[in-house]
Image (cartoon, coloured by chain):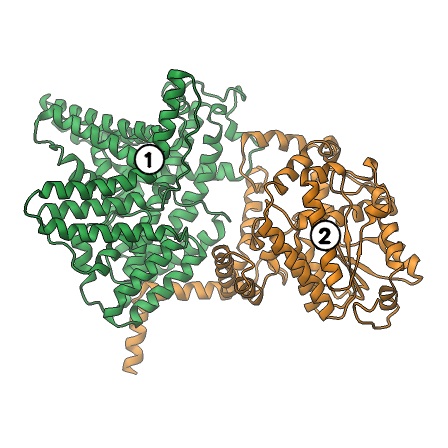
Amino acid sequence: MLFNSTQYLIFLPIVVLLFWILPQRLRLPMLLLASYIFYASWIPGFVFLIFFLTVFNWLWGKVLHRATVRKKLVFGIGLAANILTLGVFKYANFSAHTIQSLLHLTTGKTVDWSLNIILPLGISFFVFEFVHYLFEIYRGNKPIDSFILFALFAAFFPTQIAGPIKRYPDFVAQMTTTNKLRLQYFDEGIPLIVMGLAKKCLLADNLSYLVQVGFSTPGSYGAPELWLFTYAFAFQIYFDFSGYTDIGRGSAMLFGYHIPINFNLPFIAKNMSDFWHRWHISLSTWLRDYLFIPMGGSRKGEFKTCRNLFITFAIGGLWHGASWSFVIWGIYHGLCLVAHRTFANLSRKIGGLEKFWETPVWRYFSIFLTFQAVCIGDVFFRLQDTRLAFNVVRKMLTLHPIYSPEEAGHFFVFKPEMPVAVPLIMALVVGLIVLNLPLSALNQKCIFKNCPPVLKAAYCAIVVIAMVTLMPDTSAPFVYFQF
Amino acid sequence: MAPLTALIKRVWASTFLICAGFLVAFNCSINEINPLKLDKFDKMKTLWGTQVAKIPSILASSENADVLIVGASGVLVPSVRCDDAYYGRRTRYDAVYMAQSIWSYSRSDFFQHELSKGFGKQLDLINAAVGGCMESDQYLILRRYLASGKRPKLILLFTGPKDFIDNWRPDVTTTAIYTLLADYPTRISDIMQNNVAFGPAFQSLSDTALKAVCTYYNARSDYRDYLTDVAARVTGHPKSVGIALPQQKKVETKFANRNDIKPQFSQSKERKDLANFRITYRPGDTQQFNMQSKFMDKIVALAAQENIPITITLMPLTPEHIGVLGSDRFANYKRTVRSIAQRWHVACFDPASEITFDGSDFEDSAHLSTQGGKKFFACLTDDLLKERTITASLDDRRSLIGQH
């Protein structure tokens, strides 16, 4: 069941209604049942996977908490079980394909080891939540006593498929608090859902048309057009994923629960480090807490810090998808972070430039530069064919050719026979780039949050009408569902 | 007064409630003003050029024809070709003609003429055959046609294997006819009878529920179409429904000058249409075949329930087409249709077993040409004349189905 389907528009009010009319003690079991129904609406069999993983981690958490000797071993077994499950479902096909290709390269033999394993929805997210749970128990925190509460932590439908990756102390604290129905929950939740849907259906889905046009045959376009398609894709994944998060946060708010934000205006980031503090925040903090810091973090000298950053992001790339293009994407981000760190260290050592780093000129330039760097990485995110992705990046960086090889002297996308959707979406991309800074500034000042309810309501109503009118008939699934 | 004031204050402070109020007000205004002056049937405008475009007007029409044709493109295409020849019109074989003329055609005047001549009285005929539709769609069309108060004296059901096996339409609910015509009882009964998988059925049901609640949601595609039209006029770019891939550019250029349009069928006769049918038929879905057989049974049962005579006619196909389908499956299809006809004691005609159709009688592997159509309708008229029940029914003497 997708958040942007009419099914969800019926499912959510029913669950919300049941939640508030049921007595407190039945609310969490009902929410758990609803979450399993939500999950089963895709492939019912995979409910057992999430259920067995939940049972295992709940029991293992208790064992780990009681363990006094060989605690590290007990923790390691729990960790391995989770990583192995993720590995089998997510990386078995990829590994088999890689070995096949290597065999073909070295021996010339072609073997077919296709495993055709279906990736269960949201597995990367709930496995990361289980790993976080085991880590925290290992570090001495108290495990969750109630199985229903623990199962709900993993399966809670607003965050089940694509996060944000929750932290159990915050979640459990909210779940165990007695809640009373307040109109305020709806006043905060519904606008979040509306904005999330608009980001997905109105912006991301329409942008995806242009992205599909561009990336289906990137060889047909000149460098400026490729930049335009890449910008469109950058905004598409941002609106797609942050739209999903907003719908999830808004849905949780209808039950009176707060889910942490996952995005904080990432396209006004001043550098790559700042970008990762604003983009997919729950993943970047997870990677920091459970990968970067356990590897030594930034405590063991500059070289090891850079090494840890690089490894963390290469693994983060692989987490995004079982394909070499995602590994390259992760490595690219790791390298960018290392480069930024080195540059920041160097600039600190060079005297006399402190004032320059604070000027608006440098600030806007660094925002511009960071956005370009992110967009270059996104080419690897979009194109699974790494050779093709490198070619596209080469064309973009060298700005050659300017025009499409087939359309000498013309930009293909400007041709008059292009359907009206193409120039309109191109205008949308340009508008988003131009308005990115002023809109982000307004957002930072919480203009929307602080305006009178009637204006907020009018804004939401206009967005709903625009969305219903202009959304495509067939909405693509959320980009992050594949992870 | 105090509680009321408190309530008003509370509502006025609620974003959610005011927003809901705005949306309800907007929906009511749209309903009242109807700026695009939409017709009674939803999606009327956006149906233009689609295969189902003709159905709303057939249902809304007050014409109560003597004979109703139910089927797919197998009977629709030769009806158009024969009528073009009958009226001396220039027929065309391009996609534009297909979309604008063939799919929307609801007559079969040549066949009507033949029938009237044969039965010795003027008979009216309405052609409700819809390109690409399956037995489940034909059942819906017939049900809605009868529910609209019309009562034909004879129903002619034309069938082909594609009405039973179609990999392009794996689910009953995914067809355009189902989207257009299935009402709540139909949708719910299809779920209860296990005719559709719960997931897609629930999706289409919830979408229909939303359309029923919200007029604007129901007509959103019309408004979007209107806005696209305005944008296209302002920018000078063409309107388009698909994704503008570079490959499509060449096709569009080709169609820019209509005089350059080449007949598609002459080309497809050998290659394209058989390649498409390969995907249509292979791999065959037994479950789908059984499901569609059940719907053919329901069509005949519905006619019996309404006491209207019905006949089933197997459409002729080229040997190449049967080769793609597979002779075993073709035999199974014929056996199934005949067993349904036998069970309900209705006539089942197979013109291909009575007269010979050669290559020139077909414009592609599944559709009869003008020449083939003339032979087919003449043969069918002879077959119908031999059926006493039908003669009686068309003579306005009421008779029960199966009394022949």
Query: Is B31 situated left or right of A315 in this image?
Result: right
Query: Is A377 situated left or right of B204 in this image?
Result: left
For the colour orange, the matching chain is B
Q: Residue B384: give its label.
A: none
Query: Is A287 situated left or right of B316 in this image?
Result: left
Chain identity of mark 2: B
Who is closer to the viewer here, A163 or B372? B372
Residue at label 1? A91
Tell me the quarter of the image containing the C terminus of chain A.
top left
Q: Residue A197: x and y, percent?
A: 39, 52
Rate crowding at label 2 as few (under 14), some (14 to 19) or many (20 or more) other CA atoms within 10 Å: few
Classify mark 2: helix, strand or loop. helix
Who is closer to the viewer here, A133 or B13? A133
For the colour green, the matching chain is A
Q: What residue type is labelled 1?
A: Tyr
Q: How far, Cα to Cα, is label 1 from label 2?
A: 49 Å
Q: Is residue A263 something one can see in this rendering?
A: yes
Q: What residue type is labelled 2?
A: Arg
Q: In this view, does A383 lie above or below A184?
A: above
Residue at label 2? B335
Q: Is residue B256 above or below residue B134?
A: above
Q: Residue A81: x and y, percent?
A: 23, 42
Q: Residue at x 39, y 33 (%)?
A: A382
Q: Is residue B37 something one can see in this rendering?
A: no
| Co-location on one chain, circles 1 and 2 | no
Q: Residue A282: x and y, percent?
A: 23, 44
Who is closer to the viewer here, A178 or A379? A178
Chain identity of mark 1: A
Q: Residue B41: x and y, percent?
A: 63, 61
